[in-house]
C-alpha cells in the first residue's frame, strides 16, 4: 500500500499544524476546513477505511472517539462540536481512516445541519 498524504504528515514529510499526538494517533488541522475549527484525528497505522479495522479491536474504536473528544477540549469547543467519519472509497477523499472534529461556529443555530439532528 502506498503511503497516504496522512502517513506523509505523520512522517513529517508534509508540514501540518499538529494539535495532538501520541504513539497511536495524531490530530492536525484540515487543509480544506468546513468549519472555523476542523481537525482530523488519524491513526498512525494506515487503514484505508474503517471497515479494515477488525470489529474486535474495541480499543482502536474507543480511542478514536476519546481522542476526538480530547481534541475538542484542546481546541476549546467541547461544549458544541460535531464528529464526521466517512467510510468507503467513494466517500473518503483520503484513503486512510480519519475522524473529522468540527466546531467553533459563533451562531450555533445557523450552523446546525438538520439532516444530522
Image (tube, helix red, strand yellow):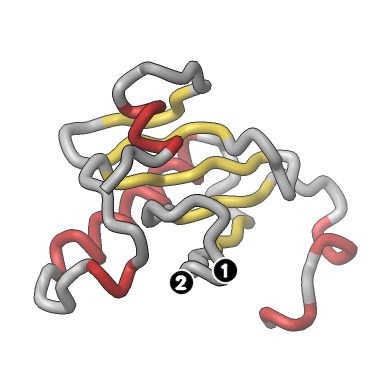
Secondary structure category for the residue under label 1: loop
* Residue bearing mark 1: 91
Label 1 neighbourhood size at 10 Å, few (<14), some (14-19), many (20+)?
Answer: few
Residue 75, compared with residue 49, is above or below; it is: above
Q: Residue at x 46, y 20 (%)?
A: 14
Tell me the quadrant of the picture where the C terminus can be found: bottom right
Q: Which percent across, then down, holds residue 49?
A: 36, 65
Secondary structure category for the residue under label 2: loop
Q: Between 39 and 46, which is closer to the camera in this rendering?
A: 46
Q: Which percent across, then down, holds residue 69?
A: 41, 52
Asked whether, in this view, residue 34 is left or right of residue 44, the answer is right
Asked whether, in this view, residue 31 is left or right of residue 41, the answer is right
Q: Which percent across, then down, holds residue 113?
A: 78, 72
* Residue bearing mark 2: 88
Q: How many marks?
A: 2
Q: Between 98 and 67, which is closer to the camera in this rendering?
A: 98
The extreme front residue here reads 2
Q: Between 41 and 81, which is closer to the camera in this rendering?
A: 41
Q: Are marks 1 and 2 in contact (CB under 8 Å)?
A: yes
Amino acid at each position: 500500500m502506498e503511503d497516504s498524504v496522512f502517513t506523509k504528515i505523520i512522517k513529517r514529510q508534509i508540514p501540518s499544524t499538529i494539535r495532538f499526538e501520541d504513539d497511536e494517533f495524531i490530530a492536525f488541522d484540515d487543509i480544506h476546513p468546513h468549519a472555523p475549527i476542523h481537525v482530523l484525528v488519524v491513526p498512525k497505522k494506515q487503514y484505508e477505511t474503517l471497515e479494515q479495522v477488525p470489529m474486535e479491536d474495541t480499543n482502536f474504536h474507543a480511542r478514536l472517539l476519546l481522542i476526538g473528544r480530547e481534541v475538542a477540549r484542546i481546541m476549546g469547543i467541547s461544549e458544541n462540536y460535531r464528529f464526521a467519519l466517512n467510510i468507503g472509497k467513494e466517500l473518503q477523499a483520503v484513503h486512510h481512516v480519519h475522524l473529522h472534529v468540527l466546531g467553533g461556529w459563533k451562531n450555533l443555530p445557523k450552523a446546525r445541519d438538520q439532516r444530522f439532528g
